[in-house]
Image (cartoon, grey):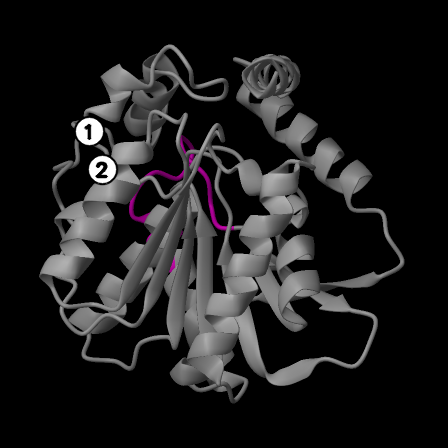
């Protein structure tokens, strides 16, 4: 019975994703924004527009007394070609509710119009802006989903390269860490992943990193040096072709003696935390627990 229910759910997710996915990239972006606006219409949260160094950003706050000392900085996903603060509300709203902390998300420049290194440059601008506002690096928990997980890691690698202080912790949801697509889950999970396929990933790589050395750690963070990285929590779905990207990242962190935890959710798909399913609530509760643990 449980297996049948899960199969039906995967089929539904595939259909919903099909409604958003569009070869016309502008229409794809608009569909995502539309979903973000519809799914996050709630009085429990306040959304405040903000401009950060010429970039559009959004601060999400719960409408109740909450912790102001720490801030969550979220990097949205979308293969570096789609996504926005508005679409990311499907995650930033849940992060704010679960953690009782403010969440800031920003619209970095997207490929193919703005390929690598535009997104990393924009993330650095936002980081510098937060420092100017008076936040310390240790006041910030950096989160990211999918390509946003890639961007979060790239940002920390860049900060480390410059000898700067790093965030208090990192939370990654289905991070896209290896643009060489060499993980075995590309084969082993191809038949069960309802959201991603090899063709889509190849198009995103071409749009974002055409002509780049794909093993450059700022392009594929999996190949980075993680010594000195802050505590990191990784979540992934057992049914996603990017599962290996999370598993291999976890192992790399272990090899560099970084405090790291990986949870793989059975029967779940890529960034399942966006979906209104039981596992999503559990995952957000786990994220909040991790954040409280490193902020305590």
Q: Is residue 131 left or right of residue 11?
A: left
Q: Which residue is mark 2?
A: 178
What percent of the width, then of the height, locates residue 44? 85, 61
Circle 1: element type: loop
Q: Earlier in the sequence, mark 2 or mark 1?
A: 2
CB atoms of marks 2 and 1 within 8 Å = yes
Is residue 226 something one can see in this rendering? Answer: yes
Q: Residue at horizontal 50%, vertical 38%?
A: 271
Give yes or no for residue 102 being in the magenta stretch: no
x and y, in percent, of residue 187 in the image: 24, 15
The image shows residue 263 at horizontal and vertical percentages of 39, 48
The span picked out in magenta is 108-121
Q: Is residue 272 above or below residue 287?
A: above
Quadrant in the picture for residue 34: top right
Residue 211 percent across, percent down from the top left: 17, 30
For the point 64% across and 49% down, the residue is 281
Q: Quadrant of residue 266?
A: top left
| x 62%, y 19%: residue | 9
The one of 126 and 140 positioned closer to us in this rendering: 140
Total residue callouts: 2
Determine the main secondary structure of the stretch shown in magenta: loop
Residue 213, above or below 291: above
Residue 111 is covered by the magenta coloring = yes
Between marks 2 and 1 in the image, the one whose residue lies nearer the viewer? 1
CA neighbours of label 1 inside 10 A, class few (<14), some (14 to 19), many (20+): some
The CA distance from mark 2 to mark 1 is 8 Å
Q: Which residue is mark 1?
A: 183
Q: Which residue occupies 54% across, 17% down? A: 3
């Amino acid at each position: 019975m449980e297996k049948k229910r899960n199969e039906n759910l995967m089929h539904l997710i595939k259909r919903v994703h099909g409604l958003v996915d569009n070869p016309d990239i502008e229409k794809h972006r608009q569909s995502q924004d539309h979903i973000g606006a519809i799914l996050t219409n709630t009085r429990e949260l306040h959304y405040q527009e903000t401009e950060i160094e010429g970039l559009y950003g959004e601060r999400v706050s719960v409408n109740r007394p909450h912790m102001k000392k720490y801030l969550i900085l979220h990097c949205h996903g979308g293969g570096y070609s789609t996504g926005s603060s508005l679409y990311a509300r499907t995650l930033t709203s849940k992060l704010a509710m679960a953690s009782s902390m403010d969440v800031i998300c920003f619209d970095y420049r997207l490929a193919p119009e703005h390929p690598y290194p535009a997104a990393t440059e924009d993330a650095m601008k936002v980081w510098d802006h937060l420092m100017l506002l008076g936040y310390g690096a240790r006041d910030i928990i950096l989160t990211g989903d999918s390509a946003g997980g890639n961007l979060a890691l790239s940002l920390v690698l860049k900060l480390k390269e410059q000898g700067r202080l790093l965030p208090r912790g990192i939370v990654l949801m289905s991070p896209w860490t290896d643009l060489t697509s060499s993980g075995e889950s590309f084969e082993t999970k191809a038949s069960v992943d309802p959201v991603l396929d090899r063709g889509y990933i190849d198009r995103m790589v071409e749009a974002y990193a055409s002509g780049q050395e794909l093993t450059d750690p700022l392009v594929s963070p999996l190949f980075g040096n993680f010594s000195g990285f802050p505590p990191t929590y990784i979540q992934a779905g057992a049914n996603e072709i990017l599962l290996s990207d999370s598993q291999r990242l976890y192992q790399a962190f272990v090899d560099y003696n970084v405090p790291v935890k990986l949870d793989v959710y059975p029967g779940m798909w890529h960034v399942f935390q966006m979906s209104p399913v039981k596992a999503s609530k559990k995952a957000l509760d786990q994220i909040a627990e991790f954040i409280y643990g490193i902020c305590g």
